[in-house]
Amino acid sequence: MSINRILVADDEESMRWVLSKALRKKGFSVDLARDGDEALRLIQTHSYDMAILDIKMPGLTGLELLDRVRELKSDLLVVIMTAEASMKNAVEAMKRGAYDYITKPFDLDVIDAIVEKVNRAQEMTSQVTVLKEELKDRYQLEKTIIGNSAAMREVYKTIGKVAPSDVTVLIQGESGTGKELIARAIHFNSRRLGKPFIALNCAAIPKELLESELFGFEKGAFTGAVERKLGKFEQANGGTIFLDEIGDMPLDLQAKILRVLQEKEVTRTGGSQNIAVDVRIVAATNQDLEEKVRQKEFREDLFYRLNVVPIQLVPLRERKEDIPPLVEYFLQKACAELETPRKQCAPDAFRLLSDHNWPGNVRELENTMKRAVILSSDLLLTASDFPGLRRQKGSGERAANEELSLEGIVDIKLRSCFSNMDKMESGDVHTMVLEQVERPLIRFVLEKTRGNQVRAADILGINRNTLRKKIQELGIEVKKD
């Protein structure tokens, strides 16, 4: 079977026209729907091989229509379109059974690639995997995993696809890229939600103690074992166990992990009873496990049992478009945790942070923002509040010579806001921009008036008492000649 007839549902006439013209030119039969309700009627009365649905439409939304499609025609392939790229939308669409997820605007070659991929897959199998449509609960991932780069969107789609099943997942990436967050995202979007999520760093525990941590021990098993202790696998029963830095696990212990995967049972140290466990294993490493296999430092059979679904996290230096929203998130998180007034980053600080290569990845960025919040008494963080960060060649002189402009501040803030629009409440952009612009504006006018508050208030068009209040609230130092 190959793709022949396609339904396109979008409330934008221009989008319907462009897609229908392009698809018909490729030889496909195309029907159009202006909203979700019309699309549902067409699906109920016609036979389609694929449906391309906008996520926001009058009547039934794309996701609601996707749910109905899964009930009516589970073999219909659905591609979700959206103008708002967000992790929440991507994960939700893939979990509900979407075949793919694309962000507007997109090149028409993307649609061609999807159709080609479908045709190749259907030549090998007559059935297309349909993900579970019923969700028990949701963990608000967009609050903890930040990024809308192409690389991160692929990760979100994989999470949505793999979470409902129990297959093992191997997350690979440099230290600090957020491997545990991805593991938690998989767990919180699975049927095991509400059951334990147990994390264990295999590199942080001495090798001689790692086995008893994983499998537990019986009373008297060794000196100091004064009572029975359950291991991590038993603690995680019914849920998920996250084995971080599994590349550091000793070979003899790797064999026992393989047995758990195969037999689904453990034996406590010093015990003889086999204990059944129902645990999903998610592993992570910052090492090249394939190379370790070649070097006989990691079991080949265990590697293939773990690497059923690989997820590769790219380093922060390769997705620098995610730095501005990450900076905003970690800055406000640090201010909330440290109970300090809300701070903002100036354009020169954003440039410096974006130029840095971040060898410690997201973890290093988070710690850098927290340190700046602690050490700076200023409400506007500038490049001088981030000493020691390396700039790209030639950028240091540029950043030092460029003046802090109101236009630059607004531009940086709006770009950051629009990249995270799905997380913002109504009116938040106005408030956030005003907070960032107000302080440099007042300070600039005071500098030009040489500290004359009466003249500054007149220029600003505000009452002198209001200006005094603002100076105090914003912590502005008034210098008089």
Image: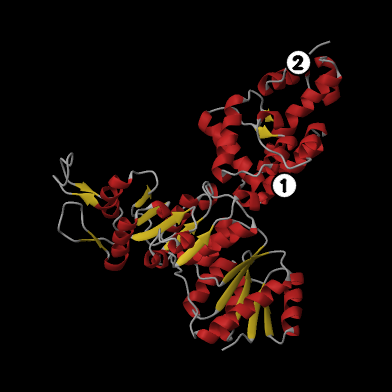
CB contact under 8 Å: marks 2 and 1: no
User: Residue at (64%, 82%) from the top-left corner?
Assistant: 6
Q: Position of residue 67 (x, y in %)?
A: 50, 70
* Nearest to the observer: residue 264 or residue 21: 264
Q: Which quadrant does the N terminus fall into?
A: bottom right
Q: Position of residue 291 (x, y in %)?
A: 48, 61
Residue at the bottom extreme of this rendering: 1
User: Residue at (18%, 39%) from the top-left corner?
Assistant: 224
* Nearest to the observer: residue 361 or residue 343: 361
Q: Which quadrant does the C terminus fall into?
A: top right
* Amino acid type, residue under disc 1 in the picture: Arg
Specify whether residue 72 is in view: yes
Q: Position of residue 133 (x, y in %)?
A: 46, 69
Residue identified by numbered label 1: 415
Residue 478, numbered label: 2
Rendered position, 90 above or below 480: below
Residue at the front extreme of this rendering: 295
Residue 253 in which image quadrant? bottom left
User: Residue at (25%, 48%) from the top-left corner?
Assistant: 212
| Horizontal side of residue 411 vs 219, given as left or right | right
Within 10 Å of disc 1 (Cα), the crowding (few <14, some 14-19, many 20+) is: few
How far apart marks 2 and 1 lie (CA) works out to 31 Å
